[in-house]
Amino acid sequence: MRNSILAGMACAALIHAPALAVEPRKIATTQSLKQGMGAVRISIQSQVQLTHGTLFVWFLREGSDPSRYANQLRFERETGVPVMGSNMVDSKPLVFALQPGRYRFVAHGTGCSTLPPPNAICTNGGPTERYEDETPVFEVKEGHLTDAGEFILEAPVGTDIGEGTGVREAQKNPYTFRIRLRPSAQPLPKAFASMPAGPAIEVPDRFRSSIQCRVRPKGAMMYLPFEC
């Protein structure tokens, strides 16, 4: 318990610190990819609309010093404004330029903008977790496009996920929500169709998503159920 509290305090102290991890550069065409670089397509999203702020997802470059910020990679998904048609629930795959290498998923957090240490809890009570042991890994190769799929902050199977119930569950039990993965159902943009495919992402079974529903039900703004 003491370690958890101390880690939470450490994360809290960093909540307003500048983003020191590498934030990948989004690209729209293959012409934007510099020589020696590769690309990854990834969607960061949440099963339910969160009220805790931006969702951050971190990776570490394998074989590098994890304490150096240059080896920490951070993607994000802002909350948006659901009533205006912008949320954090829908799939939103984007393409980013990256240096070749293997990148291991290590953490997620909402509100804390710096990599959370083990057992950290952000002060705003948002879902936070530092993952240990075997986790998903994607590899980027020079001149190739790796499709990492959808990284979804997901409730435990069997949770009542509805327009109001899902949001309340995330508020009451935020630390039961964990990142899970599934392949993207959206085709590659034409601008990247000619790029050779990079290696398939490595996903341990415990990280595979249980959400079968691909799009929000008609009229829904705040959630994505397990089954439509």
Image (spheres, rainbow, N blue to C red):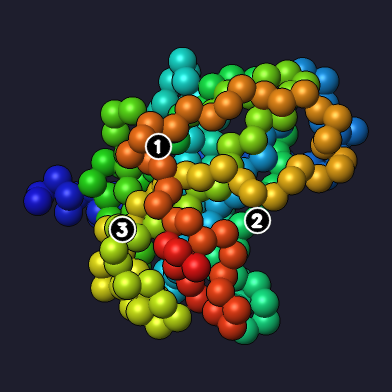
Residue 109 position within the rendered picture, expressed as x and y whole percent measured from the top left: 40, 53
Give the amino acid type for the residue marked by disc 1 in the picture. Val
| Mark in front: 1 vs 2 | 2
Q: Name the N-terminal-most of marks 1 and 2.
A: 2
Q: Is residue 53 above or below residue 33?
A: below
Between 195 and 25, the residue placed more toward the observer is 195
Residue 120 position within the rendered picture, expressed as x and y whole percent measured from the top left: 27, 50
Res 69 seen here:
no
The structure residue drawn at horizontal position 42% and vertical position 26%, both measured from the top left corner, is 66
Q: CA separation, marks 2 and 3?
A: 23 Å
Circle number at residue 106: 1
Label 3: how many Cα within 10 Å (few below 14, some 14–19, many 20+): few
Circle number at residue 92: 2
The structure residue drawn at horizontal position 38% and vertical position 41%, both measured from the top left corner, is 207
Between 228 and 36, the residue placed more toward the observer is 228
The structure residue drawn at horizontal position 26% and vertical position 73%, both measured from the top left corner, is 172
Q: Secondary structure at mark 3?
A: loop
Between 133 and 18, the residue placed more toward the observer is 133
Give the amino acid type for the residue marked by disc 2 in the picture. Lys
Q: Secondary structure at mark 1?
A: strand
Compared across the picture, whether 204 is left or right of 194 comes to left
Compared across the picture, whether 165 is left or right of 86 comes to left
Q: CA separation, marks 1 and 3?
A: 22 Å
CB of mark 1 within 8 Å of CB of mark 3? no
Residue 11 position within the rendered picture, expressed as x and y whole percent measured from the top left: 33, 52
Q: Name the N-terminal-most of marks 2 and 3.
A: 2
| Mark in front: 2 vs 3 | 3
Residue denoted by label 3: 157
The structure residue drawn at horizontal position 57% and vertical position 43%, both measured from the top left corner, is 183
Q: CA separation, marks 1 and 2?
A: 21 Å
Q: Secondary structure at mark 2?
A: loop
